[in-house]
Amino acid sequence: MVQPDDQPKALVFDDPGMRLNNQLSSSRGELSGPEDGSSSGEQRNHFLQKIQHSIRKLWKMAEQGQHKVFNDPIHGHMTLHPLLVKIIDTPQFQRLRNIKQLGGAYFVYPGASHNRFEHSIGVGHLAGELAKALHATQPELLITERDILCVQIAGLCHDLGHGPFSHLYDGTFIPEARPGHEWRHEDASVQMFYHLVERNGLQQEMERYGLVLPVDLTFIEEMIAGPLKKRQGEPHTETVDEWPYEGRSKDKSFLYEIVANKPNGIDVDKFDYFARDCHHLGIRNNFDHLRYFRFARVCEMDGQKHICSRDKEVNNLYDMFHTRYSLHRRAYQHSVNNIVQFMIAEAFVKADEHIQIEGSGGEMFTLSTAKDNMEAYTKLTDDVFNQILNSSDQGLDEAREILQRIITRNHYKLLAETKCKPSQIKMFPRWKEALLSDLQDDRLNPEDFVVLDSTMDYGRKDKDPIEKVYFYSKRDPTRAFHIPRERVSSLLPTCFSETLIRFYCKKTDEEPLERARVCFGYWCEDRGLPVPRMERTRAQRGPAEDPHGQGGGQEAPQQNPEGEQVLADGN
């Protein structure tokens, strides 16, 4: 097992200046002669010091000359370490140029053309900026240049494992193509990172710039995907005092909160995609991550060091989480975006066995298995969309027809939508089966309909996200504490999650569409869900209009299980 980096070490470059410096220091006694205090000995020592200083200065200038400046529309001019540039200039990283950051949203929002490539560079930049800000504010944390470089690499490489159209691949396609197969893009990011390092011979470059292998590789891996023990499923009994990470010891625990903050979700990954996605979508971003950097501070709580914010910033953090919700509501979970993503995934499932990708050793892989071989996965990008669309292979006819409907804006039609409570979402699979059965009873083909659920929240499902955030005060900047919501404002939301159930049809004939809407309305009514706006309740229609003959002719509003009235317009 790799041992953690117990003692902080300064970043040591493998450079001629340092080596000459050591040689000159070791031979200084010989050159300066006996320590007789003679002026000749002092002059020699002074001369050697000037040589050492000049060589070190020239070497530092050469190192700075290898840094590259990237002009980014979000963060301006970003100066990146030469090791980061070497990682960027690899086929495995360049692949991200051809993977859309927001998947199918580009078919809904014309500005959403940005890719994982620029987002990853932005996260790497912000990771370094936050680490440097903490070091400047609290030098006692002993954050080394080596720590900062590792954090930057983790930020740069955290999304290497995304497949075509980003979350569409791991969130929709893989569960359909390989049911029961558990897989996360973070795990693929780790695999692709090691593949990138090995294929491009970057081990020596990493050591040249001061990294210690393999401990720093483990540190980078853990920042991307979490503790090794939990991911490998090793049997162990975790206690409060147990430190699950191996790359760094407990006194550097705050470093794990920079790229992917597992406890509360406040990390530089979100800072970049909030700013970048809002910019390209034309949505206002109310959160200023530079202000967060200014007030970020590390405090100890329960034996671990955490990144904390000033207590006066609590409302700004609520705004940040609300921005996340707004992006999901207005873009990521947009009704048209949802069905476009579903259609792309549906086409990929139909095309799965007909797309062959060569991996290592000449072995062939399909769309759904390419992720198991990094050589093949490197070749899998959004380009597969056009590969299917422009293919003459008859085996791809069904998939091609679906994609053709997307680019001609003839996507599946939204018939209705309703909301359900967080406590009801676990019943959705059973409810979905019942709805499709009702459609069949009403002489409609269930295969012509799609039922999707979309959950939008503040980042912690139905929990208040600020509950896990630590703060400090100006009076005592060393003590971390939580802020109860009643101390913030009485106007804060009481519900932090909602789920929409959307009902789509693949056909365009109006008569069956109307019958399907009626059926969906009754389905909602029977389960105490808000009835879609275009529907009247069964009581209002009466038995003559009830296709299932269940009308009771009651005039009173229906009651859901919570005792609330269900109105015909869904309000």
Image: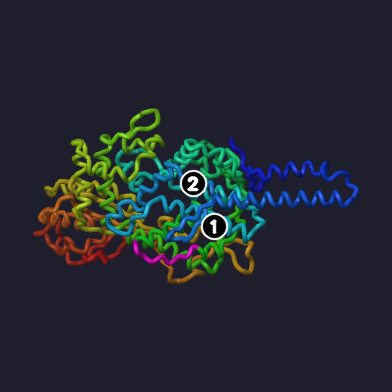
Q: Nearer the viewer, residue 176 or 86?
A: 86
Q: Residue 564 in the image: x percent, y percent?
A: 29, 64
Q: Amino acid at mark 1?
A: Glu
Q: Residue 202 in the image: x percent, y percent?
A: 52, 39
Which color scheme is applied? rainbow
Under circle 1, the secondary element is helix
The residue lying furthest to the left in this view is: 544
**Residue 288 located within the stretch drawn in magenta:** yes
Q: Few, some or many C-alpha atoms within 10 Å of disc 2 (few <14, some 14-19, many ≥20)?
A: many
Q: Amino acid at mark 2?
A: Ile
Q: Which mark lies nearer to you, 1 or 2?
A: 1
- Total numbered labels: 2
What residue appears at the point 73 percent right and 49 percent down from the top-left corner? 51
Q: Nearer the viewer, residue 565 or 41?
A: 41
Q: Give the dominant element type of the magenta stretch: helix, strand or loop.
A: loop
What residue appears at the point 24 percent right and 42 percent down from the top-left corner? 388
Vertical position of residue 325 compared to residue 175: above or below: below
The residue that disc 1 covers is 129
Residue 145 horizontal side relative to residue 559, left or right: right
Residue 180 is tagged as none
Q: Nearer the viewer, residue 302 or 97?
A: 97
The residue that disc 2 covers is 224
Q: Residue 397 in the image: x percent, y percent?
A: 19, 40
- Quadrant showing the N terminus: top right
**Residue 321 located within the stretch drawn in magenta:** no
Vertical position of residue 330 compared to residue 262: above or below: below
Under circle 2, the secondary element is helix
Vertical position of residue 215 compared to residue 476: above or below: above
- Quadrant showing the C terminus: bottom left
Magenta region: 281-289
